[in-house]
Amino acid sequence: MLLAHAVTLAEARSYLAALADNAVTIDASIEYDRVLLQIDFIHGDLIPAISPVAATDRGVLFTVAESAIEDLATHGIDGLTVELVLDMLHSARELDAP
């Protein structure tokens, strides 16, 4: 895994974890965790650590997570797989409505 891929993956993982921590409902939190687990599954044993993020606004967290997941396609992750993960992310967001 190249450094740029690792940075993108770490960003996606960090913002997904922040979304799970800041979710309004338990169901939304679980779904965000499922997206995180799916990304981990796709990458196997090559998983960078999650780091704290400064933002707590769920809209900002979602936008950054979505962008990082989309960017995974530029690092060799199959486009269909990325779309499926994005669909999971959007499903989680629907559960995270106030």
Image (tube, grey):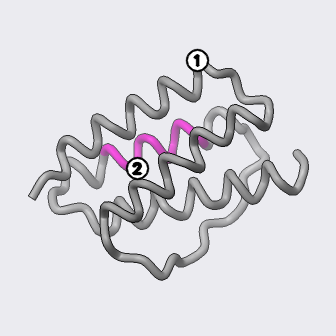
> Is 3 left, or right, of 8 in this rendering?
right
Judging from the image, what secondary structure is the residue with disc 2 in? helix
Residue 43 position (above or below residue 17): above
Q: Quadrant of residue 81?
A: top right
Judging from the image, what secondary structure is the residue with disc 1 in? helix
Magenta part of the chain: 31-39
- Disc 1/disc 2 C-alpha distance (Å): 20 Å
Report the residue at 32% width, 61% height from top. Answer: 59
> Is 22 left, or right, of 79 in this rendering?
left
Circle 2 is placed at which residue position? 33
For this orientation, the residue located farthest to the left is 98
Report the residue at 39% width, 64% height from top. Answer: 60
Foreground tag (1 vs 2): 1
Query: Percent position (x, y) of residue 15?
Result: 49, 62
Q: Is residue 43 magenta?
A: no
Circle 1 is placed at which residue position? 80
> Is 18 left, or right, of 6 in this rendering?
left
Residue 25 position (above or below residue 86): below
**Amino acid at pointer 1:** Leu
